[in-house]
Image (cartoon, rainbow, N blue to C red):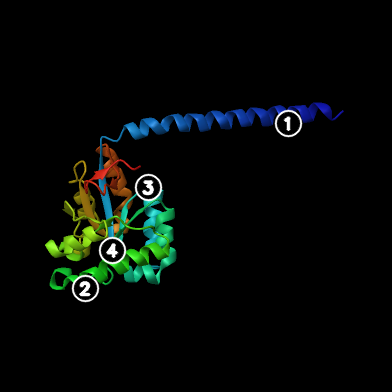
């Protein structure tokens, strides 16, 4: 007497499973076409982290909008907030070196430069962020001595093509417009702490998609944004 209903339920379950498989296949089939829609790549970068106050919200916003970015971390904060470094890595972000205490490095001697760079390499690695291959000098200030220190640690110096001016009080509209000026391979400077930058993330994603650009990784070989690997 109960055979029929059980068979009906099994048939229904089978049908639902097949429908689910078909849906997954449809999504999977769509992924290559989305990748093919990338006519170029740009580098989104965020300086001065990590922190318990700002990093979690930024990572959530980036994930929700399908964006990946390079996080240039200060060594002092990587040492203080190792769980946030791990969260950056787990979210698929790339982690770069932004010195230990954010000084004006070009006003320092080579040994001080070396300390700032090497301690940050170690702090990020100890926190679980891997060994950085990219270095952003504080304030974008550099010279031959600093570049020799970077080379010692196998680091590629990364400045930027577009400054969002978020550190200088730029509004959300201005930040989005700055992203709109990016061309293939170019890099934009942003920071993890301004509220306007966080608010701009969804519109940044829309702006890039509208121009056929995707958020890429910064190549240690060329210093330009390229397709993620």
Label disc, if present, on residue 65 of the rendered structure = 3
Mark 1 touching mark 4, by CB under 8 A? Answer: no
Q: In the rendered image, which quarter is residue 133 located in?
A: bottom left
Name the outermost residue toward the right.
Answer: 1
Residue that mark 2 sits on = 112
Which residue is the site of mark 1?
9
Of the image marks 2 and 1, the number of the one nearer the N terminus:
1
In this rendering, would 5 be left or right of 75? right
Measuring 50% from the left and 29% from the top, which residue is drawn there? 25
Q: Mark 4, residues whose alpha carbon is within 10 Å: few (<14), some, or many (≥20)?
A: some
- Say which of 138 and 222 sits in front: 222
The residue indicated by pointer 4 is 194
Q: Position of residue 200 (x, y in %)?
A: 29, 54
Tell me: residue 216, above or below residue 61: above
How far apart marks 3 and 2 lie (CA) works out to: 40 Å
Q: Picture coordinates of residue 178 (x, y %)? A: 19, 51
Q: Position of residue 175 (x, y in %)?
A: 22, 54
Q: Does label 1 or label 4 sit earlier along the sequence?
A: 1
Image vertical order of residue 32 relative to residue 195, above or below: above
Q: Is residue 108 left or right of residue 52?
A: left
Residue at 29% x, 67% y: name it: 118
- Label located before the other in sequence (4 or 3): 3
Q: CA distance from mark 2 to mark 1?
A: 72 Å
- Dot 3 or dot 2: first in sequence order is 3
């Amino acid at each position: 007497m109960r055979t029929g209903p059980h068979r009906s339920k099994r048939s229904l379950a089978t049908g639902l499973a097949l429908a689910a498989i078909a849906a997954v296949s449809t999504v999977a089939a769509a992924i290559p076409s989305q990748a093919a829609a990338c006519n170029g790549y740009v580098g989104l970068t965020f300086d001065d982290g990590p922190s318990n106050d700002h990093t979690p919200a930024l990572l959530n916003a980036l994930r929700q909008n399908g964006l990946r970015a390079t996080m240039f971390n200060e060594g002092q904060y990587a040492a203080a907030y190792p769980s946030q470094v791990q969260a950056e890595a787990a979210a698929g972000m790339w982690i770069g070196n932004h010195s230990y205490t954010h000084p004006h490095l070009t006003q320092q001697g080579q040994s001080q430069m070396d300390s700032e760079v090497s301690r940050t390499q170690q702090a990020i690695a100890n926190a679980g962020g891997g060994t950085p291959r990219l270095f952003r000098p504080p304030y974008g200030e550099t010279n031959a001595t600093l570049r020799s220190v970077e080379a010692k640690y196998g680091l590629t110096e990364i400045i930027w093509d577009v400054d969002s001016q978020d550190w200088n009080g730029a509004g959300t509209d201005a930040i989005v417009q700055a992203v709109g000026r990016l061309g293939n391979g170019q890099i934009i400077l942003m920071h993890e702490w301004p509220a306007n930058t966080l608010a701009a993330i969804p519109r940044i994603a829309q702006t890039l998609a509208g121009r056929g650009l995707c958020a890429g990784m910064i190549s240690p070989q060329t210093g330009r944004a390229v397709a993620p690997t």
